[in-house]
Image (tube, rainbow, N blue to C red):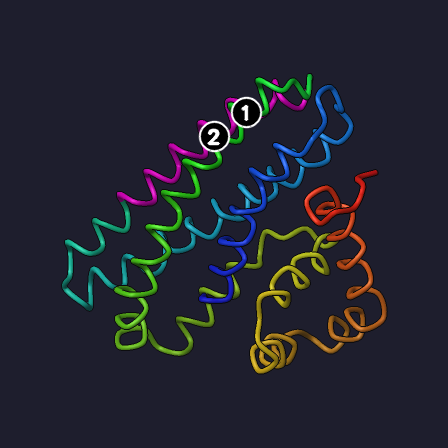
Amino acid sequence: MVVVHRVFRRESALLPRLVRAVPDGRTARAVEVGTHLSEYMTGLHHHHTVEDETIWPLLRERAADEALVARMEEQHARIDRSLAAVTDRLPEWQRTADRAAATELALALDEHRSALLEHLDDEERLVLPLVAEHLTVAEWDEVGRRGMETVPRDKLMLALGSLLEEATPQEQAYFLAKAPLIGRLLWKAIGRRQYAAYRRALRAPIDGGTAR
């Protein structure tokens, strides 16, 4: 989960910068960045849904820390509200790539990141020790399996690349070992290049390059 959190930290920092970097009126680029933003929101929402349906009920039952679980649920609700604000502003910006619309969207993303970081910090500091104590290995593996179940097949290599970007060599070896053989072969054959190309195209304006 810590590696997944690193991905959310990275993306929540990049997204407002990417929005602000879109030239006024460049709607094709706004759609490209907006699509990435929508996929980020879908992934984060699913991640939190899995926690709501698996981790919190088990901790409520076994750890007897109702206050902590309630705190996590309230933070999820705050993050949901921040994402609703982002969702409200996204269509207008994608349609017009207007500078004022970009500013509003980027500010909503800044607010979202603030709520998200508070939650991730608390979860790692307060929840993960309880997970290690109260959940079985099989239950934790099920959390990980469910975390990947909604990723479209044509996005699997991009999802794996996004995760591996934030992983140490030891963590990379662990994640790749969990993948089926065909997945490992596809990653080596095409996945690494596919993710590298996607990352370069998406981040070019903030990495000193030029967007398509």
Q: Amino acid at mark 1?
A: Thr
User: In the picture, residue 159 is in which quadrant?
Assistant: bottom right
Pointer 2 residue: 107
The 10 Å Cα crowd at callout 1, few under 14, some 14 to 19, many 20 or more, is: some
- Looking at the image, residue 62 sits to the left or right of residue 39; the answer is left
Q: Is residue 196 above or below residue 185?
A: above
Position in image of residue 28 (x %, y %): 78, 28
Position in image of residue 199 (x %, y %): 73, 53
Tell whether position 80 is magenta: yes
Q: Is residue 11 above or below residue 112?
A: below
- Looking at the image, residue 88 sits to the left or right of residue 18; the answer is left
User: Which label was assigned to residue 103?
Assistant: 1
Residue drawn at 65 percent across, 74 percent down: 179
Tell whether position 201 is magenta: no
Q: Main secondary structure of the magenta part?
A: helix
Position in image of residue 204 (x %, y %): 75, 46
Q: Which residues are magenta?
A: 74-95
Residue drawn at 30 percent across, 45 percent down: 75
